[in-house]
């Protein structure tokens, strides 16, 4: 299979990844096109030290980061509106701070992560998060942007950032418990 055909096969997964972070179809398509063009312009840069998908996703991460930074320079972000989630999150805990219901035991996470379907479910769970909560989570956990830089770029306090990350992790855990780990027998 030639490089062009392999890249075309990766395109849908790259679009999903870009859309999860950028939340705009046109911006995601632009980022993916720029990524594919960068790979095709310098095909010798891929030395085979990793899979082609890993290599191309790494380039896409930087394209997404560049796009997010350009947005920060062009227009201010609207304030975060996650206050309505506080009641939902509070209902998950008892007065003493313990959870109302213990999460399901996750059997062997390492082998579970190797399954392709897990990532499909993870993407669906990320899409269910509020837009700004998902953006903050992806910036921190997938794109490895520092907390300080996220706070500066999005105009957040560090405590607000940690609350958003906590809420994202909690909701992702619930979603994965329900749609992935709860369906395993």
Image: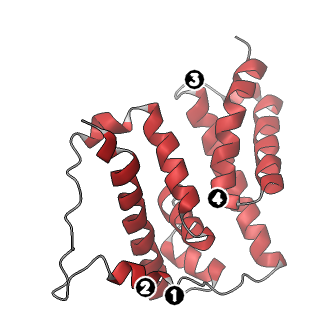
N-terminal of the pair, mark 4 or mark 3, is 4
Residue identifier under label 1: 83
Q: Residue at x 19, y 51 (%)?
A: 105
Left or right side of 144 for 103 = left
N-terminal of the pair, mark 3 or mark 1, is 3
Disc 4 to disc 3: CB gap under 8 Å: no
N-terminal of the pair, mark 1 or mark 4, is 4
Q: Secondary structure at mark 3?
A: loop
N-terminal of the pair, mark 4 or mark 2, is 4
Out of 71 and 131, give the one closest to the viewer. 131
The residues tagged by marks 1 and 4 sit, at their Cα atoms, a distance apart of 22 Å
- Image depth: mark 4 or mark 2 in front: 2
Q: Secondary structure at mark 2?
A: helix
- Image depth: mark 3 or mark 1 in front: 1
Residue identifier under label 4: 21
Q: Residue at x 51, y 87 (%)?
A: 83
Q: Secondary structure at mark 1?
A: loop
Number of other residues with Cα within 10 Å of mark 1, as a class: few under 14, some 14 to 19, many 20 or more: few
For the C terminus, the quadrant is: top left
């Amino acid at each position: 299979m030639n490089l062009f055909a392999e890249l075309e096969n990766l395109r849908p997964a790259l679009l999903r990844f870009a859309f999860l972070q950028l939340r705009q179809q046109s911006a995601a398509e632009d980022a993916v096109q720029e990524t594919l063009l960068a790979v095709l312009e310098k095909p010798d840069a891929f030395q085979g030290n990793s899979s082609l998908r890993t290599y191309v996703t790494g380039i896409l991460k930087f394209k997404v980061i560049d796009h997010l930074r350009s947005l920060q320079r062009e227009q201010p972000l609207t304030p975060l509106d996650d206050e309505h989630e506080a009641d939902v999150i509070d209902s998950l805990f008892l007065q003493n701070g313990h959870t109302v219901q213990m999460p399901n035991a996750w059997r062997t996470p390492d082998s579970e992560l190797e399954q392709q379907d897990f990532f499909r479910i993870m993407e669906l769970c990320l899409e269910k998060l509020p837009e700004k909560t998902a953006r903050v989570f992806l910036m921190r956990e997938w794109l490895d942007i520092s907390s300080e830089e996220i706070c500066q770029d999005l105009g957040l306090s560090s405590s607000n950032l940690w609350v958003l990350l906590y809420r994202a992790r909690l909701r992702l855990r619930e979603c994965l418990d329900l749609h992935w780990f709860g369906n395993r027998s």
